[in-house]
Image: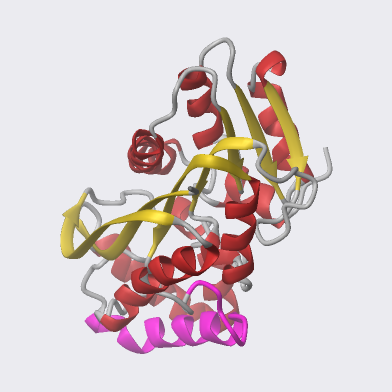
Amino acid sequence: MTTDRWASWLLHRRDGGSAELRERFAATLTGYRDGVLDRAAIAEGDVVLDVGTGTGLVGLGALHRVGPSGRVVFSDVSAALLEECRRLADPERSSFVEAAADDLSPIADASVDVVTTRSVLIYVARKREAFAELFRVLRPGGRLSIFEPINTFSVRAGAADPFGLGLDFTAVADLVAKVRAHYAANAPAADPMLDFDERDLLRWAGEAGFTGLSLDYRAEIDVPAPPVTDWAALKRTAPNPLVPTYAEAIEAALTPAERERLDSHVRDLAGTPTRHTMATAYLTAFRC
């Protein structure tokens, strides 16, 4: 199967082939999925459109809620990921549409009861247009339920290490700065991950015509998390589909001696609880 950067990341580069990391991420992702679906108030017989479905985390969950008379439309920009969803979904109650969040033109006006998204708008430059499309495809009385990480929060909070571990990198601060600089140099000039916060989500939804807006926002600073014991596996991962893996960034930014010094420092921290700083938002709204 032909793959692309979205499929490559979700199927391989997100967890680096590590069962430990996969399990670590799975619990978090399941929580996000349930948060989106619970807020969507899906009823039996509903037609649900899952935009940016990825590997189908939310869409497959929605299939369990729409019942035998309902249907889920899996939509994504990646044909490879739609094929993955097709392999897993009930073909009698599923359809698959290759489309971007800001151009859902293959989907008819007022044709679905619920629209869901999870961590999709962070990759969309034209967010106003995306909200207009989400509104357009919903029937009157339809419901929108989305989840987005608010990455500007961690930047403002000063989360410094590019590996997202919250460990003490003081002894190798010079090396971490070089790796961070490499990521900055490879980031888009106008990074859609960093051009909004929770207030923008509310404003764009209102401008698109949604009513009954509700936002659940959660911010966490230096919250303890389980240790990462497999540094080699973590280095095979990438923080998102658009940037190099940690190993690729380290290889490009550091000399062999510097790479060994960084590896040695992280090995010395093995078993140390990690910490995360982050903010997330759930937004629900209605089309009257």
Q: In which quadrant will I find the N terminus? A: top right
Residue 4 in the magenta stretch? The answer is no
Name the one closer to the observer, 73 or 202: 202
Residue 242 drawn above or below residue 105? below
Report the residue at 34% width, 80% height from top: 155
Q: Which residues are magenta?
A: 170-193
Name the one closer to the observer, 232 or 101: 101
**Whether residue 243 is visible:** no
**Whether residue 149 is visible:** yes
The image quarter in which residue 71 lies: top right
Q: Is residue 62 left or right of residue 100?
A: left
Report the residue at 29% width, 65% height from top: 278
The image quarter in which residue 171 lies: bottom left
Name the one closer to the observer, 58 or 227: 58
Determine the residue located farthest toward the right in the rendered image. Answer: 2
Determine the residue located farthest toward the top in the rendered image. Answer: 68
Q: Is residue 193 left or right of residue 151?
A: right
Provide residue 230's location: percent of width, then percent of height: 38, 49
Report the residue at 37% width, 43% height from top: 32
